[in-house]
Amino acid sequence: MKIHEYQGKDLLKASGVAVPRGIVARTAEEAAAAFEELGGELAVVKSQIHAGGRGKGRFAEEPEQPGVVLVRSADEAREHASRMIGNTLVTIQTGEEGKTVKTLFVEEGLDIARELYLGIVIDRETSSPVLITSTEGGMAIEEVAAETPEKIHNEPFDVVDGLTADQARTVGESLGLDGEAMENAIELFPALCRFFVDNDCSLTEINPLVVTGAGQLLCLDAKVSFDDNAMFRHESFDGLRDLDEEDPAEVRAGEAGLSYVNLDGDIGCLVNGAGLAMSTMDLIKLHGGEPANFLDVGGGANVEAVTEAFRIILDDSNVKAILVNIFGGIMKCDTIVEALLGAYENVGITVPLVVRLEGTNVELAREMLEGSDRDIISATDLTDAAQKVVATLGA
């Protein structure tokens, strides 16, 4: 689950992490009032969407205007907020469709001496979280990694012990910190690592982490994502979710207990089991097709959930064919066929449908398919299924 910058900063502040003062605004007048309340000569008006690159992004209707601007008066804050709110911001992470800005964050201006990069993710190689830092703050870390990897420092840390003071000092030295900034780092880096672990984050990214003229370290940006599988431990986070920022089909699937990710292809996939779903998509691509989605109905889905899965797939206008791949264990093959036949009646399947079944009650399921009068293409194995569904598109 992703959250907005201002929400991430609220959580960081509550965890003892230093962040600049800022005020949320949802109207132009609120933005002007926020500038006055902050009381400085300079402020930053930031678009709040679930995507990075906002400072370099451009609004669809005003391509010369970025998604983050400096303002020096309440009138400037009001003027920029008027054009930003309700407009579509396009960044490198949103794609050309962009995202509509509904909320702004007005933040105090700072005396910035340096900009650094800091991120925390799970490192599969070390099976631990890792603190990633770089002197190249404010830039896309992917570009830094590709062009100047020597400027990136990785510091794995233990989930129980956290980042130690010695590790924090090592990281600070790699960033060229000293004096007051180093003392700040020895407190800030472990605090951010504790925040990551305690809140079951999948990502905590501060870009940039700034060093002020006085040597203070502050989180000038905050991109925070949580592990969906751990949200049962954090019920208070439910209110942070912004459904307007999520794919409607993915939200709908989640409400039905389905794991769904929208993709760019034209072959809809309905599979049980995440590993089998990934293999199914790989084989579709191997044989010249493009999957339109990842959809795992899970092991315990009922007829209603599977029927909803068909509805979600068919609501995607890009879908030109569907591949159903079921290995019956907990999920019985006849349940899938019952839902499949029901979908013909209740949803209306108007695209070619290829079905591969194996496992629990597979013979019964095959009899049900053969006894129906539906135009369903049966497949003997996964390779056969992938070849047949791609063939229906004339590939």
Image: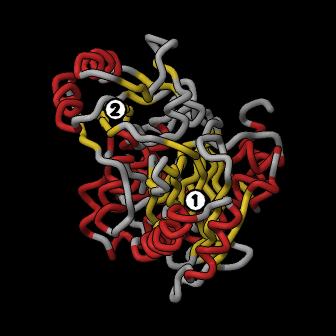
Q: Nearer the viewer, mark 2 or mark 1?
A: 2
Q: Position of residue 299 (x, y in %)?
A: 49, 73
Q: Position of residue 216 (x, y in %)?
A: 45, 56
Is 230 rendered above or below residue 319?
A: below
Instruction: State the SS at label 1.
Output: strand
- Neighbor class of circle 2 (other Cα within 10 Å; few <14, some 14-19, many 20+) is many
Q: Residue at x 40, y 26 (%)?
A: 70
Q: Residue at x 67, y 73 (%)?
A: 170
Residue under label 2, please give it.
43
Residue under label 1, please give it.
119
Q: How is the image coloured?
A: secondary structure
Is 251 rendered above or below residue 25?
A: below
* 207 left or right, relative to 278: left
Q: Quadrant of residue 105?
A: top left
Mark 2 or 1, nearer chain start: 2
User: Which of the pair 335/232 is nearer the observer?
Assistant: 232
Q: Position of residue 336 (x, y in %)?
A: 50, 62
